[in-house]
Amino acid sequence: MNPFSPNFDGTPEALLNREELIDEVVEELDNPNSPYKISFVYGMRGVGKTTFLTEVGRKVERKDNWLVVNLAMESNLLAILIDNLYIEADSKLQKVFESIRGITFSAFGLQLSANIEHTLSTYQGILTQMFSRLKDQGIKVLITIDEVKSTK
């Protein structure tokens, strides 16, 4: 049996002792000086990169003071990140996000008020405010981005 057979939405039959590395990454994420704060998981197709990220995310999700946002490479990554941070937050934290002036969250996603232009700096500003409020609440965030491609 080839453990490197690529498949989608499946867990490989053999993870080749990856559990220890997953546990190490999850544990180290609480360390402010961790070398895993920003990490790239790379390799050939079918070796389990997505499975690794998924398992790290699942274990981190179980922690009380963490939000996990799993993203796939898309054109408007910042807006999607903002939406997903809101969706993953509990109702108390959603109310904290709703206090950010000029934005509204709805079933249709992030809505900016009419006087705010949809620019990259606007999304960065919103994320800065969201992360500031998360920090005030003692919440940490794990963001995974699968299928990263070189784009402008």
Image (cartoon, rainbow, N blue to C red):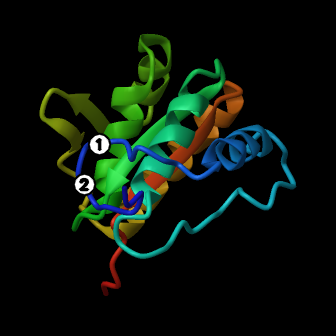
For residue 48, above or below residue 59: below
**Residues at badges 1 and 2 in contact (C-beta under 8 Å)?**
yes
Question: Secondary structure under badge 2?
Answer: loop
Q: Give the tally of numbered discs.
A: 2
Question: Secondary structure under badge 1?
Answer: loop
Quadrant of the rendered image containing residue 102: top left
Residue 118: percent from the left, percent from the top?
Answer: 24, 61
Residue ID for mark 2: 7
Other-residue count near label 2 (Cα within 10 Å), few / some / many at <14 / 14–19 / ≥20: few
Q: Residue 95 carries which label?
A: none
Where the C terminus falls, by quadrant?
bottom left
For residue 127, above or below residue 100: below
Q: In the image, is 45 to the left or to the right of 26?
A: left
Residue ID for mark 1: 10
* Residue visible at 44% across and 35% down in the picture: 100
For residue 124, above or below residue 112: below
